[in-house]
Image (cartoon, grey):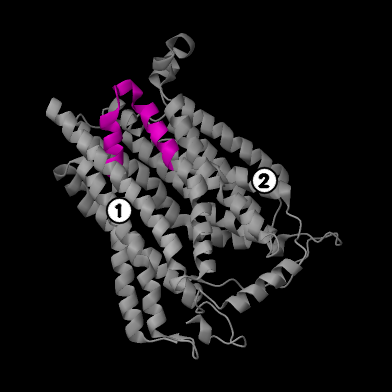
Amino acid sequence: MSSVLHDSQSVDESTPLLTDHARQQDSEAQTLSKKPTPLPKAQLTALCILRLADPMAYTQIFPYINEFLLLLHVTDDVSKVGFYSGVVESIYGVTQSLTCYSWARLSDVVGRRPIVLIGATGLAVVTLLLGFCTSLTQIIIVRAVAGFLAGNIGVFHAVLAEITDESNQALAYPLYSIAWPFGSVIGPLIGGQLSDLGTKYPDYFGFDFILSHPYFIPNLTCCLLVLMGLLLAYIYLGETLPSKVKRRDAPTEIVQPQSPPLGVMDLLSIPMVKEIGYALAMNGGILTCYQFFLTPFLLRTVNPAILYNTSMRMWPLTFFFIPFLNLIVRGGYDGLTSTTSTTTMVILWICITLVLACSRLGALAYASNMILVRNSSPNPSSLGAVNGITQFAMSFSRCFSPAFVSSVFALSVDNDLLGGYPVWVVVMLLVCFVGCHLTQKMVAMDKAKKAST
């Protein structure tokens, strides 16, 4: 496919990803010939530290939410706790998703800095308030407001784009990308290790307030960390919106000519944005349907270990079928006109739907995983710590997995063996098969445990 592309052909969002090597090498040579712009280290550091606030606030509740709900007597049926904890965990993401665009669009008018600082200040306050909650309603309201305030994540991305350029983005973006997985490591550790300290260490923390509010300390700790990031951002993170930036050689704030901001429909009219949006929306729709209609039924009727193993078996299928998506496009792509036939696109989207369905079935492993962790806890007082260790392991893998997968993919493309597929496909399949093998052992251990009781 790439061999029929001419050097004179314009490159846009519809150009194939696997382009011709000669042009790729020329582009790399031109990039290397440019002198990199020095990174704005202070602003980037402040941005990355403040970026930790979202994943910390989001994940620190995971290790102890089940205990929290049982303590509040939300339900006396232990099997139903998972439903309520799922609502609490999901409401954050729901309100964050609903407000992402509004925060980002507002930042185009008032500036990036105010939106970043307002969001962080509010997030610190509501995180602290979570430690005082005494009912499910209060928890849901606080988590909803926290997600609303954390909806400014798009503004962080905009700031990063405005303080970097093509010459230094290769260094800045990986550093920034580490913030979320690192924050999701810190959050569960805080939640798991600092919850219920009055019971764990009565000699040091046996105060009436801490005993009556056992989850105040982890929320206070997260609040203080967010405030620390807020202070750094207030000092070092300047305004980056071009229309609000003061020129160094001018005494007043000069607005440089800017094209009017595009609306939602204008943005969605861009082919690549529209197609990615469709895929992500479909992915979210499939996951939502699974979570509301399929997951509750499966958790009631299927053994958690078997469900976990079955879900994990979906991942090898997912990675096995992904290369065929590109092969479908190659078969119907006309390099001379840079167009793809309608029939090919229909087949492609049907296959994308199937691949997404497989991946979302694989994602059901998360719900059964939490149940298995609960069942494996040696005693109720250790449940928070066990969940904290589990979340740490999951989050730690996210610290290096993006770089690992990207490197493997780049290696695959560079080798150009059968389109570059064998290397990354084989590696991902091996990883998945190891996971399937381990979950199969979990099934055997679960059966042995039940047989002995």
Q: Residue at x 47, y 28 (%)?
A: 218
Residue 317 in percent (x, y) is at 30, 60
Q: Amino acid at mark 2?
A: Thr
The tag earlier along the polypeptide, 2 or 1, is 2
Q: Is residue 384 magenta?
A: yes
Tell me how many marks there are.
2
Segment tinted magenta in the rendering: 367-394
Task: Let me know if residue 171 appears in the view.
Answer: yes
Classified by dominant secondary structure, the portion drawn in magenta counts as: helix
Q: Is residue 77 magenta?
A: no
For the C terminus, the quadrant is top left
Q: Residue at x 42, y 65 (%)?
A: 422
Q: Amino acid at mark 1?
A: Gly
Residue sitting farthest toward the top = 203
Residue 111 in percent (x, y) is at 65, 58
Give the vertical position of 189 relative to 317 (above or below): above
Residues at marks 2 and 1, CA–CA distance in whole angstroms: 36 Å
Instruction: Kindly indicate the quadrant of the structure image that contains residue 11.
Output: bottom right
Q: Residue at x 42, y 26 (%)?
A: 215
The residue tagged 1 is: 362
Would you call the spot at circle 1 few (<14 residues within 10 Å), some (14-19), or many (20 or more)? many
Residue 363 in percent (x, y) is at 32, 51
Secondary structure at badge 2 equals helix
Q: Residue at x 46, y 44 (%)?
A: 397
Answer whether labels 2 and 1 touch (C-beta < 8 Å): no
Would you call the spot at circle 2 few (<14 residues within 10 Å), some (14-19), or many (20 or more)? some
In-image side of 114 versus 384 (left or right): right
Instruction: Kindly indicate the quadrant of the structure image that contains residue 145.
Output: top left
Q: Which labelled disc corresponds to residue 45?
A: 2
